[in-house]
Amino acid sequence: MPQSLKSWNWQLSDWPNFRHDESRLRPLEGEFLRRSGVHVGAISHLGKDDRESLREEMLGDEALLTSKIEGELLNRDSLQSSIRRLFGLAGDERKASPAETGIAELQVDVYRNFDLPLTAGKLFDWHRMVMRGRWDLQTVGGYRRHEKPMRIVSGPVHDPVVHFEAPPACAVDAEMRQFIEWFNRPLGSLTGLARAGAAHLYFESIHPFEDGNGRIGRALAEMALSQACGQPTLIALSSVLEKRRGRYYEALGVASRSNEITDWLEFFATMVLEAQELSLRRVEFLIQKARFFDRYRDRLNPRQEKVVLRVFREGLDGFKGGLRSQNYVSITLCSTATATRDLAKLVELGALIRTGERKHARYSLALVGV
């Protein structure tokens, strides 16, 4: 069948009455709620500074990776600095680009205002944030108006493959009024993972803006997940979707052909659960960091403390390939002999674990449960 004759979900008679097999989602929904409770409990063990640090890191990484999914590469440090300033916290004087400032504003707004009703005005504000610094678009802060079809294509110009075609611009206002009404309905049977996954697919199927639909659609999914939990969720959704980008786009493409969306919701749910697990590991990492310094703070010299802090800043995976003596020298500007003694003392204290010998020696933090 020619590509142009294939039907998209919005062209079908049952649009937008999505259907799914609740029995296949039920165990995933239960696990989502269980992990949400574990996550809240774990965060309660963090001190104020660590809670703030987690919030800035998670929102910064989501801003970074939701942009990376769309091929836009931003600076993590600039994003986190912007987010700290948006929360009224002291930040460095790092200058962020318009794109970094805008996506940081979006993430913070979703976090702060997840429980407010969705409006067209809110979506327009988000679009202005995401498109900050863009002068090549016909409409910023409003739905698309151009007459040419909104398509996602690949392949050569003379023979493109159309992966998706959205409703024409003349239909967008009505489609979005219906979407916003659907999103703002009182929480019923379609809650949690199913509602968030359906919201993301529904929005992406309309594709109401000239650009930025993916970032705003993922923000809507995060908003729906927070509403399901009754508080802001700090889950690494874009971190997981960026890592699974090929499967993510493929699943969206298949789901855009039908309004029976069980397969899509199962895929989305597994991504959310994986993101929850990653987020919980980060919380546990911060708990271990606090315990580590409670145990060793008065037993480390300034050089050792500086290096340990630097290793913690690398996050869950630590230094790629492990901390080496050369890294220690570079961070502290000490001699190789001093680095060797300091590292040996850290191993003796039980603060670091060493693998390998001599020039092949690598060091990692001695943490439990991460």
Image (cartoon, rainbow, N blue to C red):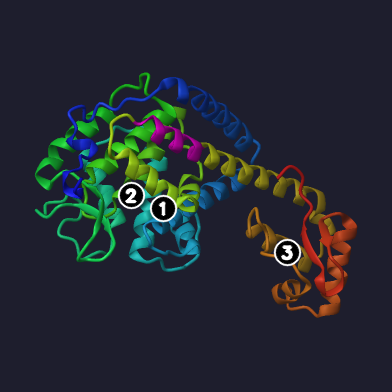
Query: On the image, numbered disc 1 is attached to which residue?
Result: 66
Q: Residue at x 32, y 35 (%)?
A: 199
Q: Which mark is residue 321?
A: none
Horizontal and vertical percent for residue 11? Answer: 17, 36
Q: Amino acid at mark 1?
A: Thr
User: Is 204 in front, or is 37?
Assistant: 204
On the question of residue 220 being in view, the answer is yes
Q: Residue furthest front?
A: 1
Q: Give the label on residue 214, or none.
A: 2
Q: Which residue was labeled with disc 3? A: 322
- Above or below residue 315? Residue 30 is above
The answer to the question of whether label 2 and label 1 lie on touching residues, with beta carbons closer than 8 A, is: yes
Front in this rendered view, residue 23 or 175 = 23
* Circle 3: element type: loop
262 vs 148, left or right, is right
Q: Secondary structure at mark 1?
A: helix
Q: Which stretch is magenta?
A: 261-272
Q: CA distance from mark 3 to mark 1?
A: 28 Å
Estimate the x, y position of residue 279 in percent, counting from the top left: 57, 43
Lower position in the chain sequence, tag 3 or tag 1: 1
Residue sitting nearer the eye, 294 or 253? 253
In magenta stretch: residue 269: yes
Disc 1 crowd, CA 10 A, few/some/many (<14, 14-19, 20+): many
Q: What secondary structure is the stretch in magenta mostly built from?
A: helix
Please identify the quadrant where the C terminus is shown: top right
What kind of residue is marked 3?
Gly
